[in-house]
Image (cartoon, helix red, strand yellow):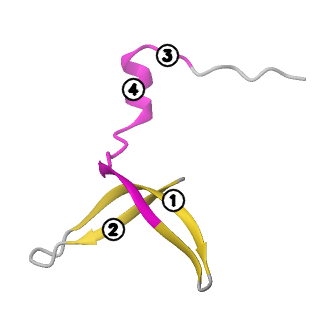
Amino acid sequence: MYIRKKAIKNKKTGTIYHYAYAVENTWKKKGARQKVKHYLGKIHSFQLFSQIEFFAHYQIEEPKKEEW
C-alpha cells in the first residue's frame, strides 16, 4: 500500500489543491494499476517562518560538533 499525492485544479479560480490517498498496486497485462483504498484528506502546506526565531524564542543553542 502506498500514499499518493494528487493535485486537483479548481476550474473556476485556477487554484491547485493537494489531496492524499492510500492506494494499492495491482499488476495487469498493461502494467501497474492503482486502486484507491482510503481517502486521507487535504494536504496543508505551511511556510517555514524562520528557524532562527524559533531557537531564539525557546532559548535553544545549536549543538556543538565534536571533533573525532
Disc 2 to disc 1, how far (Cα)? 19 Å
Q: Quadrant of residue 56?
A: top left
Name the spot of residue 43 as percent of width and height, x first: 32, 51
Q: Is residue 22 magenta?
A: no
Q: Is residue 38 above or below residue 56?
A: below
Badge 2: few (under 14), some or many (20 or more) residues near its Cα, within 10 Å? Answer: few
Disc 4 to disc 1, how far (Cα)? 39 Å
User: Considering only order in the chain, which callout, 1 or 2, is on the residue closer to the N terminus?
Assistant: 2
Q: Amino acid at mark 3?
A: Ile
> Which residue lies under the disc numbered 3?
60
Q: Which secondary structure, mark 2?
A: strand
**Residue at point 27% right, 70% down?**
8
Q: Which residues are magenta?
A: 35-61
Instruction: Determine contact: label 3, label 4, CB under 8 Å.
Output: yes
Q: Nearer the viewer, mark 2 or mark 4?
A: 2
User: Considering only order in the chain, which callout, 4 or 2, is on the residue closer to the N terminus?
Assistant: 2
> Which residue lies under the disc numbered 4?
54
User: Considering only order in the chain, which callout, 4 or 3, is on the residue closer to the N terminus?
Assistant: 4
Label at residue 7? 2
Badge 4: few (under 14), some or many (20 or more) residues near its Cα, within 10 Å? Answer: few
> Which residue lies under the disc numbered 1?
24
**Residue at point 38% right, 28% down?**
53
User: Considering only order in the chain, which callout, 3 or 2, is on the residue closer to the N terminus?
Assistant: 2
Q: Which secondary structure, mark 1?
A: strand
Left or right placement of residue 48 versus residue 31 in this view: left
**Residue at point 90% right, 23% down?**
68
**Residue at point 55% right, 64% down?**
25
Asked whether 20 or 49 is in front, the reply is 20
Label at residue 42? none
Q: Nearer the viewer, mark 2 or mark 1?
A: 1
User: Considering only order in the chain, which callout, 1 or 4, is on the residue closer to the N terminus?
Assistant: 1
Asked whether 38 or 41 is in front, the reply is 38
